[in-house]
Image: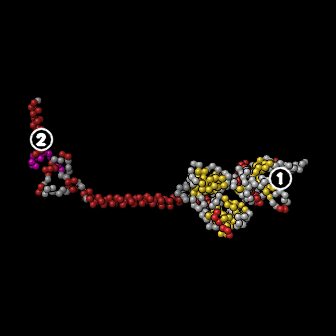
Amino acid sequence: MKKNKGNSKEQGHRSFADLFRKKDEPLYEQKEKGIRHPEDATSFLNEVDVSYGDYGKAEDMYDTWGLGDKEASVKGRKKNLLVGALAALIVVVLVVSSVFVILPAVLPGLFKGTNIELFVEKPVTLIYDDTFRVVDKSVCDVMFEPDPSSVRVTQVLYNEPVMVLADNMGDGYTLIRTVDGIDGYVKSTDLISDTDSVEPDLHEYKLVVSETSKNIMTHASQGTLVTQVMMNTVLYADVKRDGVYQVSLPGGGTGWIGSSGVIEIAPREEIEEVSCRYFVSSALSFVNSSYKENGMTMRGMSVNGMTYVCSCVNGIRMPRTMEEQMQVGVEVTLEYDVVTGELITDDIIPGDLVFFRVANTSEADEEYEMAVCTGPGTLLMVAPSGTTIRLVEFGPDSSLCERIVTVRRVFSQ
């Protein structure tokens, strides 16, 4: 055992001495030229040929390291980077062109005639030309003459389109025609020429105000007041959020309006007709309103104006003037008691329009007033004082019965 141990030490000394042998006495078997191995690390020091200078002979990169011309050249690497960057740029351009140019141009034809609306542009047909203006005031008086002291023919509401018949008349008035054919004069400053806010095909939603009034605000919450709009004002919106709409305003601005008290329909649709009880409910919201001749808002109301706005928001197209309203619907046949000769007032039911001759006038005078029946024996009409819209009771013995000219039934029961 001791002998073997000594031999082991001797072998260890030989291995250490072998590191200093001459070049012609290689320690290991010579490896294939051009391939480096970890065990050659120390022999690399002995391979330097000093005859070529301090740094030895230049190595052949292909023979020594296995590199080709492209890998051995710095210029080649830069060229490869430029080619790669150009290829990436071309790919980006092609992708962007496909998404924003090629696909929108090709896909509509592929989906034509199907129910798939992907990339299909909504057709736009403009209704109003440059002869139209839009009302830029909450409510605007339409006068018989270009004079503020003239007779009020009717009123037009915010964002309502009107046709211009003659512009810049005397005293700053414009002669207009409403969409339902009423001519009159309005202040030129109350109109605006931009009609985008009333073009249905430019918007997503049509809104009709069904409350007596609504506020348009600058922001969806905690905004400031832009304007107050009245019942039957028509607005168009493009954005709908929880409880609010962003509406287009005359002149190109936008505002926000709450969804309560607003009817939403498609831009070119009309409100569906409802039963008479909804019409009566709308009319009752104007009880005790101030009376104004041919007025149609909570700021000043007439019975014919009330009938007009309340009918429109409940699905019935109604003319604005009392004379035309006397011709709408179906005439109710009035019956009289065979014994007393008194009118049977039960035949007049809620929702009926009742027309009277004005007190102390004859049939030849053709002066009329009107009322809306809101319940059995109850009429909503101008109070005897002529200042407000009030509920008035009537029965067979009422003096009103003697002045009835016609009763018209418009809404279904």
Magenta range is 21-32
- Residue underneath mark 1: 400
Corner quadrant of residue 253: bottom right
Q: Position of residue 220 (x, y in %)?
A: 56, 51
Amino acid bearing label 2: Ser
Eye-nearest disc, 2 or 1:
1
Q: Identify which residue is drawn at 12% across, 38% down.
A: 12
Of label 2 and label 1, which has the lower sequence position? 2
Nearer to us in this view, 15 or 395: 395
Residue 22 is covered by the magenta coloring: yes
Q: Identify which residue is drawn at 20% across, 55% down.
A: 63
Q: Is residue 327 left or right of residue 242?
A: right
Say above or below: 149 vs 204: below
Q: Identify which residue is drawn at 33% across, 60% down.
A: 82
Q: Position of residue 119 (x, y in %)?
A: 52, 57
Amino acid bearing label 1: Leu
Q: Is residue 190 visible?
A: yes
Query: In what element is the residue under mark 1?
Result: helix
Q: Position of residue 57 (x, y in %)?
A: 15, 57
- Residue underneath mark 2: 15
Residue 160 is covered by the magenta coloring: no
Nearer to us in this view, 128 or 14: 128
